[in-house]
Image (cartoon, rainbow, N blue to C red):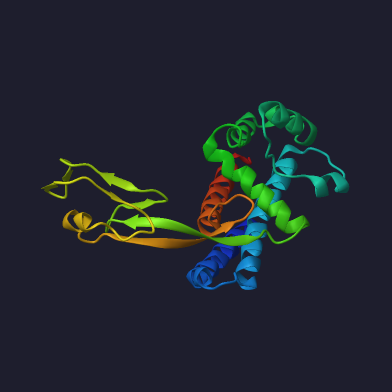
């Protein structure tokens, strides 16, 4: 792979940026305004990872010996399509004969498409974020308050917990039904069965466009793109 060192460098740099984001993530959750440092670091991380996909697309074209003009190469993108017909049409137009030159690579690229299953949806969401950051503006990040019920181990977010009379909880039989609600002081009965019970609001920073947690989303994207790279590297022969 001609761009192996560059791709490795981008993955390493994006990982370091992720560490920087994580280091002041909690601080930003406590502040009234999300800092420009967080917003720009998020953009740099996304663009590093998006470039990995673009470099892989160039590697695939060059391995296939598909002739392209400089303009075509500049406009070439990694295949991310919304349905089977769209994918096959895109591949036919941009990665001509790849299905016959490298059937295994073609099948792999098809297998990771967002329409294949919900686990692949991250790729489509990531692509939208990258294009928005690159071509329009920094994607707005907002803070969301999530009600949390913490049992000192298991955590329930966003809803209430109902404990019925006769239930067996932590070695005890519940004598009277009770409900634990977010944003409310736990009932007296609850303390008898849950010694470490606390109810609080969890502050999270999310992308305004898709309501996904910023840090968690980027960690998942980094891991998935690294897996795509490692797999394609074995198929570029």
Q: Residue at x 77, y 57 (%)?
A: 136
Residue 101's x, y, as percent?
A: 69, 30
What is the quadrant of the C terminus in the image? top right
Whether residue 75 sits left or right of residue 98 in the image: it is right
Residue 233 seen in render: no
The answer to which quarter of the image holds residue 63 is top right
Residue 110 seen in render: yes
- The image shows residue 174, relative to residue 152, as above or below, that is above
- The image shows residue 121, relative to residue 210, as above or below, that is above
Q: Residue at x 12, y 48 (%)?
A: 172
Residue 11's x, y, as percent?
A: 58, 59
**How many numbered discs sit on the rendered protein?**
0
Residue 161's x, y, as percent?
A: 31, 47
Q: Residue at x 67, y 58 (%)?
A: 139
Residue 164's x, y, as percent?
A: 22, 42
The answer to which quarter of the image holds residue 140 is bottom right
Whether residue 183 sits left or right of residue 168 in the image: it is right
Q: Residue at x 42, y 51 (%)?
A: 158
Q: Nearer the viewer, residue 171 or 47?
A: 171
Q: Nearer the viewer, residue 26 or 14?
A: 26
Whether residue 127 sits left or right of residue 230 in the image: it is right
Q: Nearer the viewer, residue 131 or 193?
A: 193
């Amino acid at each position: 792979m001609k761009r192996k060192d560059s791709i490795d460098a981008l993955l390493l740099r994006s990982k370091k940026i992720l560490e920087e984001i994580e280091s002041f993530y909690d601080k930003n959750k406590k502040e009234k305004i999300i800092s420009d440092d967080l917003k720009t670091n998020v953009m740099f991380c996304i663009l590093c990872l998006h470039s990995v996909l673009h470099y892989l697309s160039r590697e695939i074209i060059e391995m296939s010996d598909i002739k392209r003009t400089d303009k075509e190469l500049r406009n070439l993108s990694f295949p991310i399509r919304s349905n089977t017909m769209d994918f096959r049409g895109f591949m036919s137009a941009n990665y001509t004969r790849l299905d016959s030159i490298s059937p295994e690579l073609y099948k792999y690229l098809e297998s990771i498409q967002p329409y294949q299953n919900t686990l692949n949806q991250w790729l489509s969401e990531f692509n939208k974020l990258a294009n928005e950051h690159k071509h329009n503006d920094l994607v707005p990040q907002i803070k969301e308050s999530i009600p949390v019920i913490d049992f000192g181990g298991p955590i329930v977010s966003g809803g209430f917990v109902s404990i019925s009379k006769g239930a067996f909880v932590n070695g005890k039989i519940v004598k009277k039904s009770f409900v634990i609600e977010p944003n409310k002081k736990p009932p007296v009965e609850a303390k008898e069965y849950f010694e470490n019970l606390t109810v609080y609001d969890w502050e999270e920073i999310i992308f305004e466009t898709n309501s996904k947690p910023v840090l968690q989303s980027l960690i998942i994207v980094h891991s998935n793109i690294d897996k795509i790279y490692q797999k394609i590297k074995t198929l570029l022969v």
